[in-house]
Image (cartoon, coloured by chain):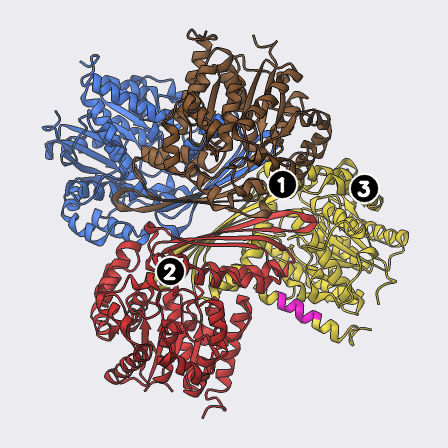
Chain colours: A blue, B brown, C red, D yellow
Amino acid sequence: MNTNERIGLWIVGAWGGVGTTVAVGLAALQAGLADETGLTSALPEFSDLDLLEWSTLTIGGHEIRETTYRAAAAELHRNSNVFTVELLERVGDRLEQFDRNVRVGTVLNVGPTIESLAADSARATARETAWATVERIGRDLAEFRQNNGLDRVLLVNLASTEPPVPDDRLQALRSLNWDDLERRIRDEQPCPVPASTLYAAAAMLAGCAYINFTPSLGSDLPALDELARRQRVVHCGRDGKTGETLLKSVLAPMFAARNLKVLSWVGHNIFGNLDGRVLDDPVNKATKVRSKDHLLQEILGYSPQTLVTIEYIESLGDWKTAWDHIHFQGFLGTKMAMQFTWQGCDSLLAAPLVLDLVRFSEREWRRGGCGVQAHLAALFKSPMGTTEARFAQQFEMLRAWAADVRRNPQRSDAS
Amino acid sequence: MNTNERIGLWIVGAWGGVGTTVAVGLAALQAGLADETGLTSALPEFSDLDLLEWSTLTIGGHEIRETTYRAAAAELHRNSNVFTVELLERVGDRLEQFDRNVRVGTVLNVGPTIESLAADSARATARETAWATVERIGRDLAEFRQNNGLDRVLLVNLASTEPPVPDDRLQALRSLNWDDLERRIRDEQPCPVPASTLYAAAAMLAGCAYINFTPSLGSDLPALDELARRQRVVHCGRDGKTGETLLKSVLAPMFAARNLKVLSWVGHNIFGNLDGRVLDDPVNKATKVRSKDHLLQEILGYSPQTLVTIEYIESLGDWKTAWDHIHFQGFLGTKMAMQFTWQGCDSLLAAPLVLDLVRFSEREWRRGGCGVQAHLAALFKSPMGTTEARFAQQFEMLRAWAADVRRNPQRSDAS
Amino acid sequence: MNTNERIGLWIVGAWGGVGTTVAVGLAALQAGLADETGLTSALPEFSDLDLLEWSTLTIGGHEIRETTYRAAAAELHRNSNVFTVELLERVGDRLEQFDRNVRVGTVLNVGPTIESLAADSARATARETAWATVERIGRDLAEFRQNNGLDRVLLVNLASTEPPVPDDRLQALRSLNWDDLERRIRDEQPCPVPASTLYAAAAMLAGCAYINFTPSLGSDLPALDELARRQRVVHCGRDGKTGETLLKSVLAPMFAARNLKVLSWVGHNIFGNLDGRVLDDPVNKATKVRSKDHLLQEILGYSPQTLVTIEYIESLGDWKTAWDHIHFQGFLGTKMAMQFTWQGCDSLLAAPLVLDLVRFSEREWRRGGCGVQAHLAALFKSPMGTTEARFAQQFEMLRAWAADVRRNPQRSDAS
Amino acid sequence: MNTNERIGLWIVGAWGGVGTTVAVGLAALQAGLADETGLTSALPEFSDLDLLEWSTLTIGGHEIRETTYRAAAAELHRNSNVFTVELLERVGDRLEQFDRNVRVGTVLNVGPTIESLAADSARATARETAWATVERIGRDLAEFRQNNGLDRVLLVNLASTEPPVPDDRLQALRSLNWDDLERRIRDEQPCPVPASTLYAAAAMLAGCAYINFTPSLGSDLPALDELARRQRVVHCGRDGKTGETLLKSVLAPMFAARNLKVLSWVGHNIFGNLDGRVLDDPVNKATKVRSKDHLLQEILGYSPQTLVTIEYIESLGDWKTAWDHIHFQGFLGTKMAMQFTWQGCDSLLAAPLVLDLVRFSEREWRRGGCGVQAHLAALFKSPMGTTEARFAQQFEMLRAWAADVRRNPQRSDAS
């Protein structure tokens, strides 16, 4: 039984659109003001897994801008017509409690576009050394745990997308074990890893789980997986699968199963939130496009011409609108087309996935699991630990894990 | 090995759009003029099942209109811009051979709209008794087998959609065994079953397999399944899953897996082929709408508001264009929307499925299987023998069958 | 100068979605809480016409249901995510003032579907004679004028769409002059005209202008135009042009000007407001479809195959979503397609048009105009007094009128 | 009467997609194998203008690639499923006659992407001086006229889009008169104007009319208009308005007339013809995007956020597919959306416009007109000689011209 454990959810990018929606949503669930629509973990088939209760969760995090949950939520309401005024009023006190747990993040190696969004207090962190940053993050997490009497803390990366690590550097990083990587983070100037990886390392060193909801590198290095196993914590990622890519992972297997040849797949995405402003920088966008585009080849087994654009259109606010045009060839060379548009509110699609990831990860961790969680592939665009890209098969992996939890509530290989 | 067997494909509705495309497509495959795009059975994962070779197949069928494959194919080319002139020229001789195997079908119990399309020669069949019709069909099949030296014949129903059998009559029919049903077909005036069921019975009595590619009743009665087992033939159906419903069976599971609540699902279908003209009759359309609409409830576990329209728009020819609007609710009550359009050429999507069904059915039959083939659910809108409505799971059923064929090329329970 | 005149806007269907939005919108404009976006009459090119100021307007009306503006507006906010809570709070007092001017309407000849929505108090009006109804409406209007010190009153029909008047009866009605029609309304049982025409007659007899924003018959009879001229009041109609039909009147002229041959034009409309529930009755729907469909023939000069559906999908609330598929033929017989979707909030599109019609009509009336106002065609689906169906040309008619008002602020032919 | 005049249509980019379709279309019209669908000049309202008859036209042109009309047409048929085999067979001889009039064009100042498409014979022209090129073009035109006994020749630019002329150089060019510009073309190295302007100058010097169907600079300089008037020839341009931009010029005026505030207008264009391959070069694309994007500001009077992309997707061939998302604000701040998709075959939309421009231009020229033809604005994306961007008003300009031709078949100001 988990009734006595208290769980902390530490959000990097705490006051961003998704972070704010996680906070509002959790507060609403705790107050009984919202139902569980949108939460995979609330499906009947997962009801007997002894997942954590909403009441046991509290929120803290790192942030480089200055605002509050109330202000950020009010802005989302105004710009994107989400939440009700009544709801925001009723969860206001709870949001203020969460605010008290928010600390200054780091801008080290986040790239100039993200850095330009930072408040002065956060911008100063650029002068910290990498290892000092790791240690500061660790202290913030420890303090969060202590102040709130928490048994476990999971850090979720919801920060804006970083520029990609160049391929050659990435290859070098992949060859390192943790001791080597730690040494390089301590010694090298400039720091060889992006901020998302510093957060991952700091979390693991502090005995916390790590969830990477962004396409940034985070814990996707053998050295970090080694560290996670050494510290006996779970981690997973990358890039929450909320909209257009979710549909790709659902639709592409159909074309494959019908032996319909995809000639081209064009996807245009427009939206106007902060994430969009960061992705308007071509460098940051490159990381995202890569994350959205690779799966077609994996599912189809060949490479049709593809195009993915992501454009910042301010008036849309948080409403991500995608148009996909799929051109395919059927029998006797006949060319046909499918098109779809997706009009989804990004933060409201992402926030329940974050809560799902926390619940599923906490459960695996609690029963003694550690290292990368490949069975969470259905929730990620670029899942770690598996090459399965088909949504239905990914979902079966989650169900298989659930069956295993039922059979083995405590892992035999756990110490 | 199947190299010595010769297989007959008998098409009810031989010269219709799908039938014609099956004939053109088969002729093209036999002549090496077409690749296997669009054919599920040609996927690498089914390549070692010893499925029949194209060269072993020949085509015949029943038809109530008067035309030829060449003329019907030329009309499809003209109205719908499919096939190339060059292809049609090169397969012309083969099509003429197929033409020679076409016989007059029956208009008994097909409903007035279909009957109005019939040539005089076919209209006269309305005066035949039901059992005389069954016997005549049987003789046509026997003659087809003999004339062409065929080892096995599979009858595929590609005729226009019949009006639905009223619920109370259907319930009564479902309670009968074959002996009772045969007696009633022999004795009752008017005949208690639709033409599609007469064809199914006649095929089975003649030792042929039966495939129902339409939403008409066909062999979907316990009595017919009993007959199939008694005659040791396979059967399957109903209603080939080619477009909008295929997408429903692919997309609805995603909404379910994400716990997104579908509020309404509206699907409008427009097209202008002969099938469309028959479905313009509200009575015939009712059968089709039912076939396209039931699966959402099965997949989601609740009943969102749904709407399915099918409208005859002459200018579209064989190009079935569907617009679906899916309204759904996410986290914190947020309403979002997905829309898709599907622009598919109906006959070119259906024809490879027909060839797939023939190949898969023949293989199961050859290894000693009989009765309903639930493992072909992925190819039908309203699959018989299973309630599984999710496409990915249906496709896994097909793969499981393939694995079983590999393990048991000859069924142990086969005589 | 109009500064001293006070104007009354009398709404039939006062608490419906459009009526409520007109009330909220007017209150917001009067309080300086809204800008004039969406109002044609607020365009710079009409700024020097001495149109009425928002401060001079007050609202009353007839209604057959029991609610209040506050409650109706809160429901619209809840179901369709329009208005802000803050706005509704700030205009609440003003809405209560409008509420006090609302009286019980009539259900005489509105058809069973509309009647079924009526409160008991309104349902009792079915027993009134037609002429008693006319007289009661007249008394309500007189009282409204007197209580509020109004100089002019314009009645706007925003009630749900009535069933169509049968063609033969309509033809007979069109042949009558006012004296004959009045006699028949007084004497005939059942009443030969629908409720919308009784309202029109009552308004004119009471010296009020009449605006028909619905496809119902209203004042579209020679006898009513005669009465309008006799009473020196203006009238106009039918059916506010807010969405899909607006686009037809904009797009069809392009196909005509390019000599592109429209092969088929399919329009599917889905929405979930009260209007939608009434139109779900095929009888009422017939009136609406006719109003949306006729203009293609008028603009193109030939009749492509057309299809218009209107379906009630509850989850959409006031958000009218239309999908139009336009199939056309270009050079050398090439078939091409244009598709559009329109996602508009019906009440928010209609309300500013209502305010525009009141302003333009009041101005023409004030300068001495009377009878039908053909120059308002751009605002109607089925404009009275003209056969011009092309939007750009209709808008030029409005500009020509504006130029005439500038030249002749007082009509020379006015008494 | 024009019955005795013979007219030459000289196409720069003769064997491109549009050029080929013009040739096939003209041959089909001359042979009575095609109707006049898609031709504005064939509308009844222009039937009494004494426009040229199809039989009087012959085709020649410049080209930098090596092929033939038959081969280019067959490729279009194969890749894009346009034309019928039968039609191509029946016009083959005529196409061969046209082929004989095709000469090697120039690659001078066309930019590297276009140059890379050129055959060796054409690539050699890069070494010619600019003035030698002008003279060579003049000789080709004179020879075309003489060989075919032509009374008038009109040169139409259908070549791929050139890179834009830098703003400062353009401003300098705009300040020159013809004598100065001629001197600079003769003397300056490298040549200060793009190839399209050399063609324009050469045509005018040779007494030919000039029509610029591309966004390239062409004759859009005061010096060229001066030359046209001096030589008493007509000219017009720029960039034929065939699809998405046509719709913008039709739809934007509606939003303006309704006072609906366009918040953003996003347009994504995908297609796979040669034009698309050239526009895949960002430099050439810049010219095109500018041509597609400016009109919204002109029509709306303010600048919403806009985005135009043009992407080369090979599988689409000549089928230009556009998705436009228009986000707009209505009454009380309500945000709504319109989306459209346009699936048009580019060459088949463009070719009739080319023929229209030839007919209209020839008529104006024949009656004594010279200089820029502003009244042809409806056929161009960036019309010369007018700032009118609204399609309906542009079409009225064409009608006004037609009325003037009726009144003045011979211009009084013509010598």
- Tell me if residue A170 can be seen: no
Vertical arrangement, residue C192 with respect to residue B207, above or below: below
User: Identity of the amino acid at label 3?
Assistant: Gly
Q: Residues within 10 Å of mark 1 (few under 14, many from 20)?
A: some
Question: Disc 1 marks which residue?
Answer: B80
In the rendered structure, are the residues bearing label 2 and label 1 in contact, judged by CB atoms less than 8 Å apart? no
Question: Disc 2 marks which residue?
Answer: C346
Q: In the depicted view, which residue is nearer to us: D358 or C352?
A: C352
Residue D224 magenta: no
Q: Residues within 10 Å of mark 3 (few under 14, many from 20)?
A: some
Gap in Å between the C-alphas at discs 1 and 3?
25 Å
Task: Identify the element where label 1 is drawn.
Answer: helix
Vertical arrangement, residue A100 with respect to residue B85, above or below: below
**Residue at point 51%, 46% (across, down):** B280
Q: Residues within 10 Å of mark 2 (few under 14, many from 20)?
A: many
Instruction: Same chain for labels 2 and 3? Say yes or no.
Output: no
Most frequent secondary structure within the magenta stretch = helix
In which quadrant of the rendered image does the C terminus of chain C lie? bottom left
Q: Give me the disc on residue D92.
A: 3
Q: In the depicted view, which residue is nearer to us: D38 or B61?
A: B61
The residues colored magenta run D395-402
